[in-house]
Amino acid sequence: MSIFRTLHRSILFLFAIVVIAIITLAHFSVSKIVAEQSRIHQQSLSPALSLITEHLMKPLHVSQTLSKSKELQALMEADTIDATAVHETLQRLEKEFGFLFFIASEPARRQYNSDGSEHALVEGKVNWYFKYKDKPENAVADIGKWEDTHFYIDLKIYDDQERFLGFFGTGKSLRSFLDLFAQYKQQYGYDFIFVDADKNITLSSDPDLVAANSKFHHLADLAWYREAMENGETSVNNRLIEKDGKDFLVAEINIQPFDWTMYLLSPLSERQTALSRTFIFSIISLLVVIFALFMLIYNLLYYFKRDMQRNVQIDPLTKLPNRNKVELRYAELVDQKRPIAVILLDIDHFKAVNDTHGHNAGDHVLRQVASMLDSQLREEDIIGRWGGEEFVILLPDTTPEQAYEVAQKLRLRLANMTASTGSLALQITASFGVSYTEGDRPLVEVLARADDALYQAKRDGRNQVRVQLTHAA
Ligand SMILES: Nc1nc2c(ncn2[C@@H]2O[C@H](COP(=O)(O)OP(=O)(O)OP(=O)(O)O)[C@@H](O)[C@H]2O)c(=O)[nH]1
């Protein structure tokens, strides 16, 4: 297989690796962004859900459990309510569970609170009691007590004969919710709005929307809600809305036991920041990997090319520099303005070696000649295969006389060397032509002189050294 085909294949292979790496990374980046989007969504919902669980459902469940206790039933069933016992029980429960508790007794028409206060349940004055008393629901959530607005959970209590005994429940100051919402808003940036079944705003992180003095705000009072519901929509869940010049994503969560709905408004800018952070991180990782791969490929190609060039400049049979390499080395010496002696040598009657012993034996001999010649030269000398059974030697900083001596030495070594065909020993000789330049002549010109000298040596009977000088102009 040719070197170029190998190179071509390697480039294709590396290109395929890069493409696969980019596709894989792009896939992971997209997955990461989607995962991040889900995480942000989850993150926005989970605090809201824990808020509902901790501050609405827990009081409801605690009250529901307590409302079924024998102790409470006994207190509310009594013909005459024992106010002291009722207060003591409520106070104990408040201490134990951390909520305000109350009993609103139907027989006594009085409300007893765990803070020790009590008041009469008078129609026209205590509206909630008479409003819910006649409703079919057994559990309601309500906002009341206007001087210090509270969120209440009211549970109807009946005796064994299904006689209505009054309400038991728990209350929480709205102020404590506002503090809680403020904390959530600061931590997560979200706005909360709770509405009852009639879409009256019962709780909100916006203090201006919280009911005050029995006046509720309605969800439809809010421009963003009106706009979102304009085209006969029934829900604003997952809708993008604009409020105070900012974009928000709305989540709508139904709170079943109270028939309330919570609207969670999460600011898009925070989501965008978090998402773009993930996106930028993914893009940077992608670029780093692509850059690293690019550098890897670049270096691989660089070394491959260098290696290839080295191979291209080496004669495969003798492992000596080829013509190309010799020419390059000659040009370098000329650039350095060094005088150069050139020896061209040609093995005598080499055709006969091939013809008698075969081409392989000829190759074998060529390798031995190359190796012997190479071993006889200095480090800075350059020997190359010029073609066939012809070798060229560049001797930098060498006079023609010295070059002649070198050629003679090599000639004698060759003549005295016993070459092997692989199976047989044989004697060989070579003819030498020597030439010289001060370092300012093209190689072809110097070689032409050496070639002339070499053919003179051949003509003179072979196994000779002849010199033909090239003088600087
Ligand atoms: N085995 C082998 N033979 C080669 C190679 N390159 C050239 N030759 C042979 O070398 C021989 C050169 O023959 P000629 O140019 O006639 O010269 P010669 O027989 O050496 O005779 P003179 O040079 O006149 O002494 C040819 O037979 C070529 O085939 C090679 O790489 N391997």
Image (cartoon, helix red, strand yellow):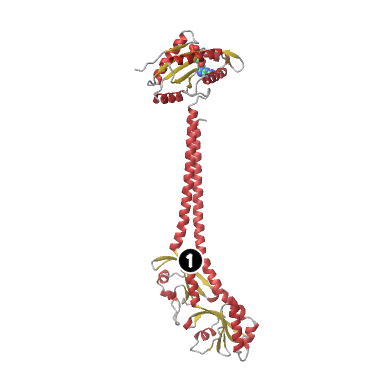
Residue 123: x, y in percent? 50, 89
Q: Quadrant of residue 333?
A: top left
Q: Nearer the viewer, residue 252 or 374?
A: 374
Q: Quadrant of residue 230?
A: bottom left
- Tell me: 86 left or right of 272: right
Q: Please tell me whether residue 203 is drawn above or below residue 399 in the rendered image.
A: below
The amino acid marked with disc number 1 is Tyr
Q: Quadrant of residue 444?
A: top left
Q: Secondary structure at mark 1?
A: helix
- Confirm or reject: label 1 Cβ below 8 Å from ligand 1: no
Residue at the far left in the pictured view: 473
Residue 415: x, y in percent? 54, 12
The quarter in which the C terminus is drawn is top left
Q: Nearer the viewer, residue 400 or 355?
A: 400
Q: Nearer the viewer, residue 198 or 375?
A: 375
Q: Which residue is mark 1?
A: 188
Task: Specify whether residue 70 is in view.
Answer: yes
Q: Please tell me whether residue 312 is drawn above or below residue 78 in the rendered image.
A: above
Residue 469: x, y in percent? 40, 14
Q: Residues within 10 Å of mark 1 (few under 14, many from 20)?
A: some
Residue at the far top in the pictured view: 460
Q: Nearer the viewer, residue 419 or 124?
A: 419
Q: Residue at x 48, y 81 (%)?
A: 148
Q: Residue at x 37, y 16 (%)?
A: 471
Q: Residue at x 45, y 62 (%)?
A: 270
